[in-house]
Image (tube, rainbow, N blue to C red):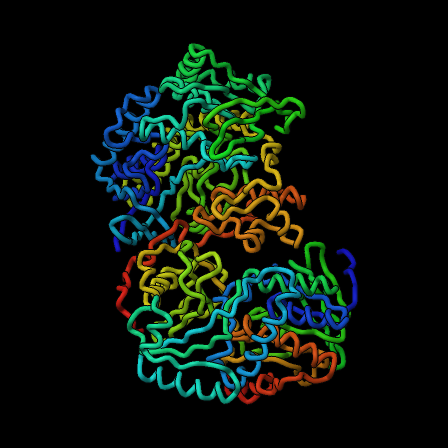
Amino acid sequence: MNAVEVAVVGAGPGGLAAAVAAAERGAQVTVIDSGRQPGGQYYRVPGDGVPGDGVPVHAPRREAGQRLVARAAAAGVRFLSGATVWGAFPGNLLALSSADGPRALQAQLVILATGAYDRPVAFPGWTLPGVLTAGAAQALLVETGTLPGKRIVLAGSGPLQITLAAELLRTGAQLVGLFEGQSLPAVLPFLRALLNQRARVAEGMAALRTLARHGVVPQTGWGIVAAEGGEEVEQVTVARLDAEWRLIPGSERTLACDTLLVGYGFVPSSTLARLLGAAHAYRPEWGGEVPVRDARCRTTAPGVYAVGDGAGIGGAPLALLEGELAGIDAAAQTGHGQATADAAIAALAPALARERRFMQTYAALFTPGPGLAERARDDTILCRCEDITQAEVRHALELGADSAAEVKSITRAGMGNCQGRICGRLLAELVARERGLPVTEADLWAPRPPIFPVPVSHLDPVWAVAPKEVAQ
Amino acid sequence: MKQARRTAADVVIIGGGIVGCSAAYFLAGRGARVVLLEKGVIGGEASGRNGGGVRAQCRDRFERPLAMASVKLWVEMQPDLGFETEYTQGGNIRLAVTEERMASLTREGEEELADGLMVEVWDRETLRRRAPYLADNFLGAKYCPTDGTANPLLATRAIGWAARRRGASLRTRTAAAAIDVRGGQVESVTAVDRDGELVIETPHVIHAAGAWSVPLARTIGVDLPVHPERNLIGVTQRRPRQFTEFLSSHDAGVYARQAREGHIHVGCIGSRPGFFDSQPGPLEIAPLARGVRLLPDLAGARYLRTWGGTLDMTPDRIPIIGPVDGIGGYFLAAGFSGHGFCIGPIVGRLLTEWLLDGAPSLSLDAFQYARFAALAHALP
């Protein structure tokens, strides 16, 4: 077993910033990340042999990520890449699994920078091959330089769709349609929020110019209804949305395509924080269930920080600031740079406040309305790991289930490989709607280790059990 | 304060586990007005969180007749439940690594045959032939073909739902708060749910709340020698269908079964004291790696998830069933010590007979609460 002062889980912007800040102040830091190389989703590095300039929008980001990784390495940060944290136990004992075998890491402090994943939205046909999340398409694009398809429909919400659309166009895709769920009048206040956001404006303007050059006009107030096809998606239906994001009957339109990308925002990856016992609150504007934190990003679990999107969707700039703040505080807590910590944290305050204000506006504008959760029909699969349909979930409700956890027990929904990361929220939303309860994800089941599938022999990171050993 | 709501029942059952639900099912089937109180959800504790074994072999000799009758009842009940419980009689293999274990299994097999339970003692070669998927270091085994498994998450619920169809009132998320005894006779039970207090007038209480029975029983002067133990099960990813039997080895400290969808469930023999109200600790989860001691193929498998349950253990590892002197109408059914999933249905039926006919059709003498009277004085 290894002991470290500070363990950082996740090597995206938040994790890297935390590692750099803590290590440059003298703390001994280990960063654990499941990716092949540090960077996370945001700074994702192309795979071997993939030309990095294949995705021009991405190049400055990738370079910024590489600079952070280099700074971390120079400060003595140890990276455990390709390692998954499958268990976390009181006292901040982390259980890891990687191709090299099991490993236990005893940390004085843990900084969780676990990021987020695309919000799952169930609609007829969402499990067809050719239907991807926007995040998956972007990862594919950056990692392999390839497009998910030729004729693409993009449906979602938020300016990220615009940037992704531009990347797709520049890589040679044909964009059949770009549908923003929010209506144009509702989006206008966003322009004011952009006033002192130079980097964002520059990125957005460049993307809009690309769209204009290709003759793509984003349709606002439109959303996905269904995807149809035999073996894979062949066409999609979209429709106009009302203020609650419910479909306006009669407005449906069908488009032929070979790929549908869906990007209705993100959900924080907070399983590890919940496993460590951190109290959570349901904040739909931050993506769902998020850890409760103090001003220094400390959760209610002793010695556990949470930063970045995993603690509430806030984007990379906010993650960088939160990571730095937590890194400074964690270093101070382990006896490094205490004298300057308070001043350094205070110096971050104005930028933090600005980013949080921006994200508040962003969330108020682009958080999908309740109608988005009502697209599934009874024959729509909700749990794609176990193939459980909405009808089966409704049957469990008729039998008396009154929580997502009980629906899971009765139907197997959420028992598959993703352990409910995809369907858990869909179930909670359905239960809430049918039972007239608020969507509190307290109704979700408690995570238990392993939170990722782990080789049987890796369950014992301390005393790996030899297969031949039998006697007690 | 709101005025407490009031209702009445012939029997109030405290605890929506397999014992309580089975009692509700049989009582309601004979026309009794039943109210079942469950603090959480039906089958949400030990009844829904166990290895899923339904076996009559390798039982305490007092428990054997109950287990044999319960296996028959498991078979009989299925068609009426109206919900798939995944119950199958896939057999039970109890394995031996040591000569001593082999000898004791052989002795036990003779007793079981004498009691009318069909079992087979397998030597090494037979075991190899009948169960080639097992690790090769077992000397032999005892096999009972009528034993089997069910899905614990579904079985208790299915019995509960069937009881409800027969007219029993199942009140979930409703905790029993007090048993009111006047003049040596049960008069009512007070429960608390989301809306406040509920008083149920009743002459009969069946107290079947597992390890949670202890504090409430104490309020009416019943000191249950029951303590909680934590039990953890690991589930692998889906695997090709390999075996139907429930496997266990005390020498290897591990048991396993393959569920209908192909997942292999593994549990360890030897649990730790305490309620399973917290995450499993690293030393609790690590022994699940023992699965490979039974099934070498598991070396290439992955654990997908774990779950934990709380066993209600008695000093002699058999349950406490029946009335308590001085408290008319109060029936205990607790301390099942990990055996409740199999024998729950028959215990539900025997309690029904006791309440409605005055006596159970199988003797429950060995399970009296009074057997601990002497012990109580000896305890610190």
> Which image quadrant is residue A181 in?
top right
Is residue A109 among the parts visible in the rendering? yes
Q: In this view, does B275 lie above or below A47?
A: below
Relative image position of residue B282 (x, y in whole percent):
36, 60
Q: Is residue B253 above or below residue B303?
A: below
Relative image position of residue A304 (x, y in whole percent):
39, 46
Relative image position of residue A3 (x, y in whole percent):
27, 52
Which residue: 43% across, 48% down?
Answer: A417
Which residue: 72% across, 66% down?
Answer: B35
Q: In this view, does B18 lie to the left or right of A471?
A: right
Relative image position of residue B174 (x, y in whole percent):
66, 60
Along the line of sight, which residue is nearer the eye, B263 or A120? B263
Number of marks in the rendered image:
0
Is residue A449 among the parts visible in the rendering? no
> Which image quadrant is residue A166 in?
top left
Q: Is residue A194 left or right of residue A472?
A: right
**Quadrant placement of the N terminus of chain B:** bottom right
Q: Is residue B287 above or below residue A339?
A: below
Along the line of sight, which residue is nearer the eye, B65 or A450? B65
Which residue: 48% across, 85% down?
Answer: B112
